[in-house]
Amino acid sequence: MKTLLVAEYRQGKVQESYAELMAFAAALGAESAMFIVGVSSGDLPKFQGTLHVAEVSEYGEYNPDAHKYLLLDVVAQEQPDMIVFSHSSYGWDLAPRVAVSLKAPQISEVIGVEDGKLVVPSCNGKLKRTMTGNGDVTVVTLQAGAFSLSEPPAGISNVCPVVGEYQGMVTLLGYEAAEHGGVDLTKSSVIVSAGRGVGKPENIQIVEGLAKALGGEYGASRPVVDAEWVPHNRQVGTTGLTVSPKLYVACGISGAVQHLAGMKKSEFVVAINTDKDAPIGELADVFAVADLKLLLPVLTEKIQAL
Amino acid sequence: MKLLVCIKQVPDMESKFKIDEDGVWFARADLAWRMNEYDEYAVEQAVQLKEQTGGDLTVLCIGSDQVKETMKKALAMGCDRGVHISDDRSYLKDPYEIASMIAEFARDKDFDLIFTGMQSQDRGSGQVGVIIAELLSISAITTIVDFKCDNGKIVVKRELEGGVKAQVETPLPALVTCQLGLNTPRYPTLPNIMKAKKKEMITIAAEELHTVSAMQKTLKIAFPEKQGGGLFLEGEVADIADRLISILREKTSVLA
Ligand SMILES: Cc1cc2nc3c(=O)[nH]c(=O)nc-3n(C[C@H](O)[C@H](O)[C@H](O)COP(=O)(O)OP(=O)(O)OC[C@H]3O[C@@H](n4cnc5c(N)ncnc54)[C@H](O)[C@@H]3O)c2cc1C
Ligand SMILES: Nc1ncnc2c1ncn2[C@@H]1O[C@H](COP(=O)(O)O)[C@@H](O)[C@H]1O
């Protein structure tokens, strides 16, 4: 079994998620080669083996058509059984393009390997499916954080340049930094977060009330931020903040993987949810099966009275 | 401008799921169904564009007869016509098959822009949009949270990890996959719901467009094993509150 691992380079940096690709290859017991559009004379992934490098100065950080053709050249050379991406803004964008060109199946957001078969989540993590691809080569993307190495990645690569006269239809104009400023949730030892289960903007207050009573800050899941009920600097998750408070209380939050990624390092997690099967239960130390609109005011009052 | 938006009907994710008899998908009975959340953003963006520039907007959905309910919502939001690709077994098809059917339909229609969701909530492959674009040899941009279109090109913002955005441009024709927060999908008004009933709904049999075979297979579907030894508190809220407080006192230092 041979894997071709596709590392990422963004805003002038190699993304550390390449180590997860290596961990996946190790879980399969596969040998591997790696590909990156990066800087061959600069910082590169720490990888033992052949590292195919196309120059980012030539092809750009986001230029999916060109990256596809470069990668296809490497695939022709390496003949891998699997081409492995992170399930990330780079990976889910590029992987299907490569799969179509190769007429290969793509299995998205792999969370595990069982007897050599790939396991993926369905329905917001409420179910999981075991998948297999037909054909000689399979494209896979890995859920962020699902695979990790026990040691930091190490190794000396044999760097092979990749070149080709490739252009793309898409032009990257520039980046916009995340909105920050104001409160810094990452410093708070207690975070009480509001999810879509709060129902309406007025109810943010009761979440904030509990946060105050516990001497902490309130946070939110993404839909609550998208609806502009709570500012983005309080959003927890992959496209928001990563927090690790002593106590995290998730109110009306289902526990989508993108939210969990931002709070799973919390020391103690309480979930308040009407749906006993909500995936947040996978992580919660205590799961109160209750309507937050009823429970929170009572809980807050009792804590204030302590 | 000729516009196409692809939508999928999915179960409400708060449903109680059961596993189907064949063991490769969930049982489809007794579920509440709705429009895939990401597709609502796609429909809204397509309708806004049509309102700005004029044009003709088709909404397409592959599925059994019951998906027409969801299509009616898209028509009430402002799509001009529905194309229902009638397929009782679409849930068993892989992303490549679904995308090929849509590409097959779109091939000779010269759409300037195609909108899809970035992923379906039940399958979550995040592939169908990009595959359609590849099969039609048009430009594709995924995960957009901001959209502008003028002078034959689009300028969009892609959302990246950590909340960073990338501004990206591409000429038409193009396909975009829509992410949460792109816009605020409108609620159909009653007059628009009534008008939607009169809009054209074209039905095409799946067999007419289905020319490829599956490339992947689901061997089984299962519930994830519960790993957290979490404690469930149920009952009266006052009682839950008391038990929760004593647990927090015992297990954390936050009430000290
Ligand atoms: C690329 C990408 C990046 C993303 N980044 C993030 C991110 O950074 N952060 C993030 O949070 N999400 C992110 N998401 C979105 C994520 O996938 C989920 O859609 C989101 O986390 C769901 O938020 P939620 O749990 O609040 O809402 P839902 O999933 O709708 O859950 C609402 C919950 O509230 C419960 N509920 C309803 N009523 C009540 C009540 N009265 N009392 C108690 N409980 C109730 C329901 O049972 C349900 O479990 C991202 C998605 C993508 C595709
Ligand atoms: N059965 C379907 N009918 C129409 N469009 C679909 C269907 N399945 C998926 N799509 C579109 O493709 C997007 C991505 O789906 P997926 O690749 O399944 O995650 C969805 O958000 C829809 O826009």
Image (cartoon, rainbow, N blue to C red):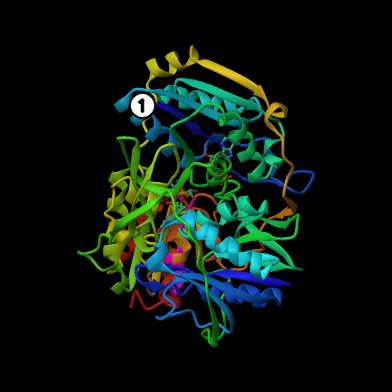
Q: Which residues are magenta?
A: A262-273
Compared with A46, B177 (above or below) is above
The chain letter under disc 1 is B
Q: Answer with the quarter of the image where residue A11 lies.
A: bottom left
10 Å crowding of disc 1: few (<14), some (14-19), many (20+): some
Compared with A18, B10 (above or below) is above
Q: Nearer the viewer, residue A264 or A293?
A: A264
At a point 27% along the width and 61% down the height, the residue shown is: A177
Q: Nearer the viewer, residue B82 or A239?
A: B82
At a point 58% along the width and 70% down the height, the residue shown is: A5
Compared with A162, A255 (above or below) is above
Question: Is residue A27 within the magenta segment?
Answer: no
Question: Can I make out residue A271 in this image?
Answer: no
Q: Nearer the viewer, residue B183 or A134?
A: A134
Of helix, strand and loop, which one carries label 1?
helix
Residue furthest front in the image: A165
Residue A298 rendering spot, x and y as whole percentages: 36, 55
The residue tagged 1 is B50
Question: Is residue A271 within the magenta segment?
Answer: yes
Residue A148 rendering spot, x and y as whole percentages: 56, 76
Q: Is residue B237 left or right of residue A175?
A: right
Residue furthest left in the image: A182
Q: Is residue A9 left or right of residue A106?
A: left
Question: Can I make out residue B122 in this image?
Answer: yes
Residue B239 rendering spot, x and y as whole percentages: 46, 58
Q: Is residue A145 left or right of residue A57?
A: right
Residue type marked 1: Lys
Compared with A196, B115 (above or below) is above
